[in-house]
Amino acid sequence: MSESKLGDMDAASFRAAGQKVLDWTADYLQEGERYPVLSRVEPGWIRSSLPAAAPERGESMGAILRDFERVLVPGLTHWNQPGFLAYFASSGSGPGVLAEFLTAALNQQAMLWRTSPAATELEEVVLSWLRQLLGLPDAFEGVIYDGGSASNFHALAAAIAHAVPDAGTRGLIGRSDVPPLRVYASEQAHSSIDKAVMLLGMGRQSLVKVPVDDQFRMRPAALASAIAADRRAGCRPVAVVATVGTTSTSSIDPVNAIAPICEGEGVWLHVDAAYGGAAAIVPDYASIFDGVGRADSVSVNPHKWLFTPLDLSAFYCRRFGAFRHAFALTPAYLQTDQPPDVRNLMDTGISLGRRFRALKLWMVMRYFGAAGLRARISNHLELAKRFAAWVDHDPDFERLAPVPLSVVCFRAVPRARELDAGALDQLNSRLLARVNASGEVLLSHTRLNGHYTLRMAIGHIRTEEAHVRRAWQIIRAALSGLCQ
Ligand code: PLP
């Protein structure tokens, strides 16, 4: 690092360090399997391995990169490994990683159209491409957020603004003319819905958890009864959140039956398809979006299952004018003289500054093409079916939920051992720990009908049948070890 000059790193140093970073990344993406999927460091190890204060003098990129490998890489859980079968995967695909590099280099701040015409308009273009692949009607316009939680939050904020048009000026607190508001989502909906109602000042008591059927899908009749009971009690239902691909089991709420209830009640319908939406681009699975075109808003996260690196959630709304109205607020210093139909992204959410996220989705969609995306997702769907069949045919295991998409929920129930419910939970929790300690695969868990449940979610771009087969071998061997 040169201390004699002001300004940035010079071009030659940038090129040399950039080459090293590129080479390291190419090797990492190619040979990532040499690292354990789940980081093995102890809490605090990273912190204690690094100096407590910033260096007074600048250091060379060589020294910085050496510490990156020595200290930080061991503290990574490798989401980019094919053995990553936990939570919902996120793929740092080649074109996605390259796009992120360019995004950082360009450092666009797309708050206004004029501060980045390309980022603003590419977002519209690429979201229109995705909308068509998802089979959503033209009336849906899109905007990109960092994640599904942000999409859900904005959906509910828009629903409130729609139901109480002067909420933006007069607020909701202490108003005798606004009855208590209610939001409905199934017992299996993602916790970001609970967070959204908390942050929107409605309190978690305003969220009604609608019971599910034996396949973990919202029961429309229970929804209708809950809405009717709330109306009788003087509450105002404002939004229903249906989920296509719930977090625990990937169950699919019957949107076709939920949409007419929302229409009849004049309630905003948001469909959270953060994970499951990607499967709707596969013709055999397009029916998972039946009725979704009737929703007011829909969210799909390409950073989960469309091979786009974190972070990118696509949010669509059928009432985009009303949606913009909910969020638009222009101080004098941000006024521009563009015509009113020119979109300024700052009018579509809480953040003012916005990254050029559309670039990575554009590069991913162009590089793989719609056919390539469909083929990869179909393959994951097929692998999940195959894994589910292995579980079903093994008498020492049982499946705990249907497999509508690429998540398999199961547990061990060893024949040789008579175990009560608590002991079975403990055994399965120890089984998961053993499997994950292998370093080759990472699974996660949930709780279904009170049972500790192992959960395999297939969605990484590099996951092939061999990885799923290997995971099954490791699981079975770990169970044998525990039962000895
Ligand atoms: N919705 C569903 C159904 C999810 O499964 C998740 C995360 O797993 C989210 C929303 C939140 O998404 P994000 O992590 O992008 O905020």
Image: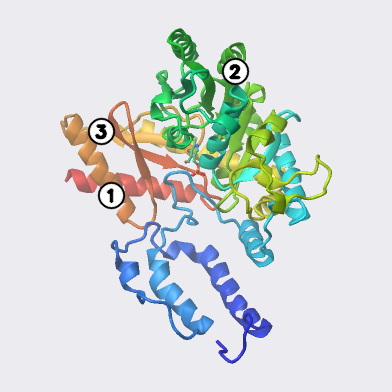
The residue that appears at 51% across and 20% down in the rendered structure is: 178
Q: Nearer the viewer, residue 270 or 345?
A: 345
Q: Nearer the viewer, residue 379 or 140?
A: 140
Earlier-in-chain disc, 1 versus 3: 3
- Label 3 sits on a secondary structure element that is loop
Residue 75 on image: x %, y %: 38, 64
Q: Is residue 110 above or below residue 262?
A: below
Q: Quadrant of residue 244?
A: top right
The residue that appears at 77% across and 48% down in the rendered structure is: 121
Q: Quadrant of residue 20?
A: bottom right
Q: Quadrant of the N terminus?
A: bottom right
The residue that appears at 33% across and 74% down in the rendered structure is: 49
Residue 272 visible within the image: no
Amino acid type indicated by mark 2: Ala
268 lies left or right of 149: right
Measure the alpha-carbon separation of dots 2 and 3: 40 Å
Residue 259 got which mark? 2
Residue 372 got which mark? none
Residue named by callout 3: 413
Residue 294 on image: x %, y %: 66, 21
Q: Is ligand 1 less than 8 Å from the beta carbon at label 1?
A: no
Amino acid type indicated by mark 3: Val
Residue named by callout 1: 433
